[in-house]
Amino acid sequence: LKRIVADNAEYFSKYAHKAVYKRFHESFKQILDSIGSMEELSTYLAQRVTLFDFSPEIKGNGYRSLLRITEHGIRVVTEISYYCLTHREKFYFRTHHYCLEVEAYTSLFLRVRDLLQYSKTCMAESKLGDLFPTSIDSQVMIEAEQMDRECFYGRTLGFQYMPSLRQFLHMVCVLMASFAEGFDRHKTSPIALMTASVLHTGKYTVNPEMRAKKIIKLTEKTNMDFCQAFWGITEGYGIQHFPLLVCPALKVNRVFHIPSQPFELASPDGELISIVPPCSWSGLAPTQVRLMSYEWRDGQVTMTTADKEEGSVSKLKPRAKGLILHIHGGGFVAQSSKSHEVYLRMWARDLNVPILSVDYSLAPDNPFPRALEECFFAYAWALKNPDKLGTTLEYVCVAGDSAGGNLSVALCMRAAEYGIRRPDSVLAAYAPFNVQYIPSPSRLLSLMDPLLPTGILEACLKAYAGLGKSPFEECIKTPFVPLIERKVTAPVDIHANNVKADSFLDRLRSRVRSPEENPSVESPTVANGDCGEHGSLLLANVTPHDSGHIGVQYRRGSDDCIVVNVVESPTGEDIVEPYLRIGTPPDEEDEDGDTLSPQNEGVTLRRGTKTPRPRSMSQVPLPIAKNPYMSPLLAPDNMLRTLPPVDLVACTLDPILDDSIEFARRLRSLGKPVELYILDDLPHGFLNFNLLAQEAKEGCDLC
């Protein structure tokens, strides 16, 4: 690459008086100047990448993925550079077109180098083998999040994927941009929306730069209504019938509702356990499920009179030994069992067991823990009524992809807490096990991922957390000023007379005065972590608030809060479900609305106002994300020890690859049986692409 680029730079420098040739020269010169740093960063990561593998046999982590993307980037830049080298003097060489191509791939090359630099910082701040750094310079993450990403969605779109998927992802991005154009004007009329989307498809196909700008605008401030509408395309406009044409036909494929009535279920010890229906956020409501089976089995189908006369009863197969409880993905906010039929139909045929898929309520209307409640309720109902599903329930497997994988693991921990029968195994494909927005090398891939970009990721996270307003909006609105350009103001003087009496700053001032100024106060031993007897001043005094059927209470002096679901039983007594712990309450702000923290150094504070400052998304606190049922990776050891054997399927080009690796490592440390499979060069959601690429089909068969 260095030889080819140097030759091109020298050639085009001879004709620098021409504007287009000058742009060629500048682009190749930029590549040439950055090759050295690219090689240095790649070597640094490659020498240490094995320390973060799950095992010597199972090699894969976010750092390897970034090196793989670097390899793809070098390949495509070499190809376009070599084409210019061999065709630059030909009469048919389209100078303007290839100038735009070279500029786009130059920008790609520089951005990949930046990603390597950010990943090097992550590695330097991480403990040995830990893919989630305990701390990282917030300015580095701000630069990463506000990096120019247009090159990833323009002419170079999908460069990291195999050719069979590259064309499909190109079509998805064109459709996303054109659908957004129609959604802004015709969201209330589906026909007008689809018509406008089709009409705008052409311009986003022939103009990659326009498409890139539109997608970046969409993902910087994601509209949840748009996400749900766009991801819901596969369930409307006739597309929902596509599996009927290309996938195996099923004898049973029907949707029904589980009544929202409490029932009792026998535990393995014979004790009767009360199972209460889902009740949080939207109150009591039936749980929708879909039963799928390749064969008619005893108990599954209610035969009509005509069927009985034709002797269809004799066609019923005996009950299967097993059952699969499936939980679909969709970022907790979209899709259903219908949109996942493209692989569920194949599973039903190949495994020849009934599949019960849960259509759980979606965020943001029904955030955590509603989806978990409904999935658990459907699982308990299946244990109670195996005869209606056509199974003897000798074994039961819980399987889910993406958000469904998260819910599958949480369901198993919930079953253990209740004391009912646990599933015999769990399959989680490309699932997020750490719902906190914290950096990792694989999560840097969301800066270029066409299916799971940064804006979509944070929008789904905040919706599932139940936040009405995205906590990340200020991170997007506040412009970033590089450190070398930022003016440093005078430090805050907490001894100034404008501090309000008996305010937080006034109380803090009395604590930090020297013994000569305040003899009655001893100097705090901050270095030893001792905040003194008044350390509770740093704890928020939060008043319990009503969240419908969920009682949320922050305890003063404690680092967690308790969520208790209370449902009135048919006998009139209150049934209290086992508690769900939530993370730490928000940091306290002083009485005038100013947050006192070390990060406020150099920022002038005025009473009654907040000085806007750029923040990384990883700095935004989401206490509820520490809940073990929301982030199983953070669950205590005693909860993880209750899990059945776990199979994890991940892919190298998935932004949440590191979640699966860290979760598998955590289970292995506890002596739990766990299998981790890492598939090369496949994106997030590959199960739905099994008809498009042979590699995705092989991954589906593996599951």
Image: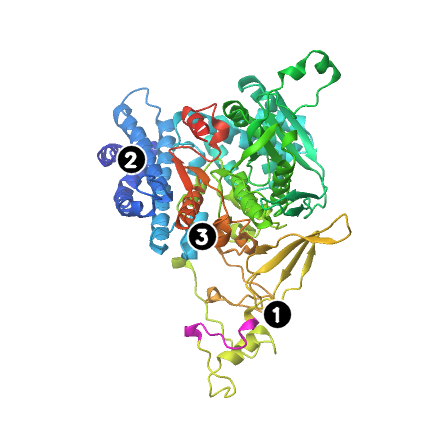
Instruction: Give the mark nearer the N terminus: 3 vs 1.
Output: 3
Left or right: 39 as drawn, with respect to 486: left
Say which residue label 2 marks: 16
Say which residue label 1 marks: 591
Q: Position of residue 607 (x, y in %)?
A: 59, 69
Residue at 49% over, 43% down:
644
Q: Specify the amino acid type for callout 2.
A: Ala
Q: Specify the amino acid type for callout 3.
A: Ile
| CA separation in Å, label 2 and label 1 | 62 Å
Compared with residue 99, is residue 691 higher up or lower down, i.e. above or below? Answer: above
The magenta segment: 526-537
Residue 54 showing in the rendered view = yes
| CA separation in Å, label 3 and label 1 | 29 Å
In terms of secondary structure, where does tag 3 sit?
A: helix
Q: Residues within 10 Å of mark 3 (few under 14, many from 20)?
A: many
| Quadrant showing the N terminus | top left
